Amino acid sequence: MRVSVSSLAERDLEAIGDYIAEDNPSRALSFIEELRAQCAAIANAPQAYRARPELGEGIRSCAHGSYVIFFTATKSRLTIVRILHGAMDIPAQFGGMQEEVSQISAKGKVDPNDSFIGSDASSGGVARHTGRLPRERFRRKG
């Protein structure tokens, strides 16, 4: 199953990394990698995760630490829609996104801005993704 990360979820990852890096730049990097690894692991059994119909058709969620990964899945593709802190007002973050979520859920719809994690059940591994955040981004300033 191919795993893609929407441009909105990439921005979420960047914001998470920036927030953690304020106190611990090296942990920011490792935590972002953990989140990406969890996204890839979801592809093994996406239907096992909690359905979230109140957020949009086909949306499911998976908790990782204090964060929640929101995704949609078809037989061939898992799309990470958002990655948000669990204390946020989640419905408000999804408010007005129904059209975007529907487009993400549409079979075969690929956003050219999406990055791919590349989990593939046939290879049993996780390929390098294209949307990786640069290490310099999380270095302490000054």
Image (cartoon, helix red, strand yellow):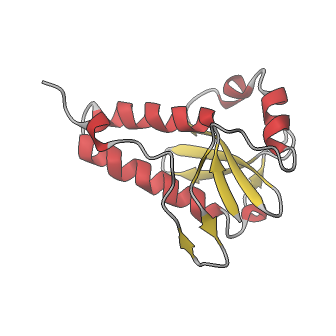
Residue 55 shows in the view: no
Residue at position x 83%, y 44% in the image = 105
Residue at position x 26%, y 38% in the image = 136
- Residue 24 lies, in percent from the top left, at 24, 40
Give left or right: position of 6 versus 14: right
Residue at position x 25%, y 47% in the image = 26
**As displayed, is residue 71 above or below residue 97?**
below
Which of 126/110 is in front? Answer: 110
Q: Where the N terminus falls, by quadrant?
A: bottom right
Residue at position x 25%, y 40% in the image = 25
- Residue 70 lies, in percent from the top left, at 67, 44
Q: Where the C terminus falls, by quadrant?
A: top left
How many numbered discs sit on the rendered protein? 0
- Residue 98 lies, in percent from the top left, at 83, 29
Give left or right: position of 105 versus 91: right
Which of 37/119 is in front? Answer: 119
Which of 46/132 is in front? Answer: 132
- Residue 18 lies, in percent from the top left, at 36, 31
- Quadrant assignment, res 88: top right
- Quadrant assignment, res 96: top right
